Image (cartoon, grey):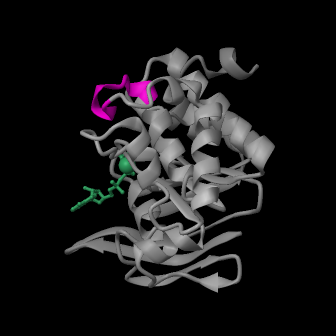
C-alpha cells in the first residue's frame, strides 16, 4: 500500500532522516516508535510532502509520490494528522471538518462524509458550532482525526494522537483508531512516544533512533525485546500485557 525506500530528509544542515525504509500493507496498523528528536515526525512530513525528500522513494499503491506537492499527495490518498493537531483554532468544528475536504469536488460525497464524521464522533456533532480552540484536548484530537478522514485517505498518518491526553481519553482515541481500521480497513501509520499503546494496537512496528531504523518486526516480538522493554516500555509493562 505505502512503501518508503531509503528516505533522507534535512532541515537545512540537519540530517533528520538518514536512509529510512518502511512499508504499510493494506488494512494494517504499523507503529513507528522512538524517543524525542528521533525523526518520527519528519518521516511522516516527508511522506505527506510538507518536508521534501532529499533522496529515496515513496510509493503509494503503484504510484511514486516522492516529489509531488502536499496537495497532490493528499488527493492521492494520504491523510496526515500532524503533531500538535494543527487545527484552525479560530474556526468552528464544522468549518475545520469542511476544510479537510477542500481538495474534493464531490459535494454530495462531502456532505455525506460530514454526517458520517458526526456519527463516528458524536461529540463533534454536538459541538458543531463551537470554536475549535475551545475544545478539550481529546475533542481536538478527535476533530483532527475526523478532519483528515474528510480527505478520504487510503493511508492515515497519525502523529502522537495520545500526546497530552489523560489516560481515559487516550483509550477512547485508540478505540476509535482500532474501529476505523477494523470497519473501514483503513491502513494506518502510527507515530508514538507512548510505545505501550502503539505496540498494543499495531500489528507491526519500527523503532527509529537518530534518523535510522534500528529494529522492526511484528509487535508481538517487539514487545518481548529486552532493549525495547528497557528503553521504551519501562517497568511494569508485564502488568499490562501478561
Ligand atoms: N522545523 C525544524 N527545523 C529544524 N530542525 C528540525 C525541525 N523539525 C525537527 N527538527 C530536527 O529534526 C530532528 C528530528 O525531529 P522530529 O520532529 O522528526 O523528531 P520526532 O521523532 O518526531 O521527535 P518527538 O518525539 O519529540 O516529536 C530533530 O533533531 C529535530 O531537532
Ligand atoms: Mg514528533
Asked whether 137 falls inside the magenta stretch, the response is: yes
Quarter of the image holding residue 220? top right
Percent from the top left, x then y, of residue 110?
58, 55
Judged left or right of residue 181, residue 147 is left
Q: What secondary structure do most residues of the magenta stretch adopt?
A: helix
Residue that lies at the very extreme toward the front in this rendered image: 108
- At 50% from the left edge and 73% from the top edge, which residue is drawn? 73
Specify the segment rendered in magenta.
131-139
In this view, 14 is above or below 201: below
- At 51% from the left edge and 52% from the top edge, which residue is drawn? 148
Asked whether 201 falls inside the magenta stretch, the response is: no
In this view, 1 is above or below 183: below
Where's the C terminus, which quadrant? top right
- At 53% from the left edge and 29% from the top edge, which residue is drawn? 125
Percent from the top left, x then y, of residue 156?
59, 55
Judged left or right of residue 192, residue 25 is right
- The foreground one among 23 and 13 is 23
- At 27% from the left edge and 39% from the top edge, which residue is drawn? 89
Percent from the top left, x then y, of residue 47?
49, 69
Percent from the top left, x then y, of residue 32?
55, 51
Regarding residue 199, the answer to whether it shows in the image is yes
Residue that lies at the very extreme toward the left in this rendered image: 12
Amino acid at each position: 500500500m505505502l512503501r518508503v525506500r531509503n528516505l533522507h530528509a534535512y532541515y537545512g544542515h540537519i540530517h533528520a532522516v538518514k536512509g529510512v525504509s518502511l512499508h504499510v500493507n493494506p488494512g494494517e496498523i504499523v507503529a513507528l516508535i522512538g524517543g524525542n528528536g528521533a525523526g518520527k515526525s519528519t518521516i511522516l512530513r516527508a511522506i505527506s510532502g510538507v518536508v521534501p525528500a532529499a533522496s529515496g522513494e515513496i510509493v503509494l499503491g503503484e504510484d511514486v509520490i516522492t516529489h509531488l506537492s502536499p496537495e497532490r499527495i493528499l488527493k492521492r490518498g494520504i491523510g496526515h494528522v500532524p503533531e500538535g493537531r494543527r487545527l484552525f483554532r479560530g474556526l468552528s468544528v464544522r468549518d475545520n471538518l469542511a476544510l479537510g475536504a477542500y481538495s474534493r469536488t464531490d459535494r454530495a460525497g462531502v456532505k455525506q462524509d460530514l454526517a458520517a464524521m458526526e456519527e463516528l464522533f458524536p461529540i463533534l456533532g454536538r459541538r458543531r458550532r463551537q470554536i475549535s480552540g475551545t475544545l478539550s484536548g481529546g475533542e481536538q484530537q478527535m476533530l483532527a482525526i475526523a478532519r483528515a478522514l474528510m480527505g478520504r485517505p487510503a493511508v492515515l498518518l497519525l502523529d502522537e494522537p495520545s500526546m497530552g491526553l489523560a489516560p481515559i481519553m487516550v483509550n477512547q482515541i485508540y478505540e476509535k483508531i482500532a474501529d476505523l481500521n477494523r470497519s473501514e480497513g483503513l491502513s494506518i501509520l502510527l507515530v508514538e512516544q507512548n510505545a505501550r499503546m502503539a505496540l498494543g494496537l499495531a500489528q507491526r512496528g519500527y523503532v527509529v533512533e537518530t534518523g535510522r531504523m534500528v529494529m522492526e518486526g511484528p509487535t508481538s516480538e517487539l514487545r518481548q525485546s529486552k532493549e525495547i522493554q528497557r528503553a521504551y516500555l519501562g517497568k511494569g509493562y508485564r502488568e499490562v500485557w501478561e
